[in-house]
Each structure stands twice: as C-alpha cells, then as structure tokens.
Image: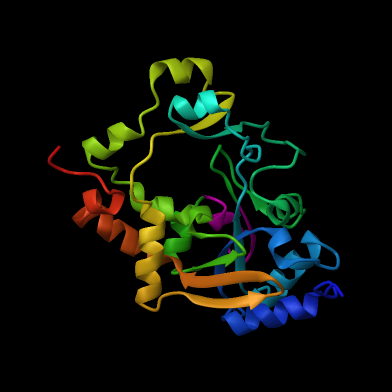
Amino acid sequence: MSASPLNQAELESGLHQLGVRPGMVVEVHSALSSFGPVAGGAETVIAALMAAVGPEGTLVMSAYPVSPAIPLTEAEQARGITWKVRLLPPDTREKTGMGRVADAFIRRADVTLGSGLHRVCAWGQAADAHAQGYHRLLEADGWVLLLGVGIDRCSSMHQAETAGFPPKIARIFVIPDDIQRDYPANQWGIGYGSTSNSPGETIWEEANRRGLIAQQTIGQALCSLFKARAVVGLYKEQLQTNPYSLFGVDADE
C-alpha cells in the first residue's frame, strides 16, 4: 500500500522537530517531489512554512527567472559546458528552475518580489528588506532550510564569493568567446569548467563534522536546517585560507 499523502499538520510537525521556530528568518529551497505525495501540493508546503515561522518570522526564496536545467548534448559536454538554462521574462508564468514550491510562493499577493536575474522574494516581517538579496539574511543571522535538496541549491552560499577566486581558479570557469557567441548572455545561463573537488560538498562535510546541521526526515524528504552565517562563513574562510585544496587545484602547476 502507498503511504497517505502528507498533510499540513504533518509538515508543520516535521518542521518543528527539525528546529524551525516562530520568528525565524529562513531561506528555503525545496523539491516538492522529494516529500512523496502531499495533499494540496506546493500550497500546503507554503502554508506549513508560514505557520512554522509565524507572522513574526520571514520566509525567503530565490526567484530567478530561468528555466529548469536543460539536458546537455554530448557535443556541449565536449566543449566544457557543465549546465545550461534559458532566461525567461521577469513576469514569466512558466515553470522555472526554482521548483514548484518557489514558483507558487512567488505568485502570492502577500510575497514581495525583488528585481534582477538573481532576484529574491520574501514573506513576513521585513519582507521588503529581505527581497533585496541574501546579504540581508546574513545580517539578520538567519537560517537555511533545505527540503529534499542539497547544499548546491543554497543561494546564500554565493555571498562568500564576493571577494572572488584566485586568478588560477577563476580562469577555469571563464566561458570562452565561441561559447559566449553561441549562447548569448541575454538568452542563456551557462556553466563552464570544472575542478576535481566540489567545494560545496567539502563545506557540507565539514559543517556536518562540526555539528552545524540539523536533519530530519519529513515524509520521504531528508530536510536540513542550519545557520546561514555559520556555513557561509566556513566557505568564506576556506576560500580565503585554502582555496586550491578546496577546489582540488594544484597551486604550483
């Protein structure tokens, strides 16, 4: 027999067991399908999140107007392309790469939507401020909640990269002119280049080792909660003190 669909009360209970509390400022990334069946779908997840942090709390989600990742051809992989997405109009009603929960959240009348390609949207206390970007989450010593997704989905991690990478590492990810020509920046988002180590996975393992991450299964989804400043700070520290090892790049070659 298949399990009964999760309801809002069960989602709220799981979030509470994980450590989500009223008044928290929480960056949320999710994959609805990871829960298994959910009665009411994305709207039920949103209702549970809102109830968990309460009106005195804040929910923040990425609202990038980009398509879901498009599978790469063998030729694209041979050119060094690692991912690609289509850029969508700012007012798109298409399914985006942010997931069904985020797509439903963005369209709510009580959610404040920021601007730009890497825009953020927010609900609750100080929503207008948090819609300006994830630097506000770090200033508020907020939290990150991953619902059935990994650290690679955590947008606030990029706040650690504001100082940039050492030139040798940065050059690995520079998109060649011929690829930029074939995938115009006003139409496509493109990833290029790779290293032997995944910085995100390395930081995740170290954060777990330090006990910075709480985890709880909700439905079928493995969910994680952690202080953004602690894990982003760990990444920033490693970028500043040990970047070559972090990426698996030989500094002397």
Can you say whether 48 is above or below 87 in the image?
below
Residue 3, position in %: x, y? 82, 75
Residue 170 visible? The answer is: yes
| Quadrant of the image containing the C terminus | top left
Can you say whether 47 is above or below 187 in the image?
below
Instruction: Tell whether position 35 is magenta.
Output: no
Q: Which residues are magenta?
A: 121-132
The quarter of the picture where residue 173 lies is: top left
The quarter of the picture where residue 165 lies is: top left
In the image, is 3 to the left or to the right of 190?
Answer: right
Instruction: Tell whether position 125 is magenta.
Output: yes
Which residue occupies 73% across, 59% down?
A: 33
Residue 121, position in %: x, y? 62, 52
Which residue occupies 47% across, 58% down?
A: 136
| Quadrant of the image containing the N terminus | bottom right
Q: In terms of depth relative to the viewer, which is nearer, 179 or 197?
A: 197
In the image, is 5 to the left or to the right of 212?
Answer: right
Residue 187, position in %: x, y? 59, 24
Q: In terms of depth relative to the viewer, which is nearer, 248 or 147?
A: 248
Q: How is the image coloured?
A: rainbow
In the image, is 163 to the left or to the right of 51?
Answer: left
Which residue occupies 76% across, 38% down?
A: 94
Residue 134 visible? The answer is: no
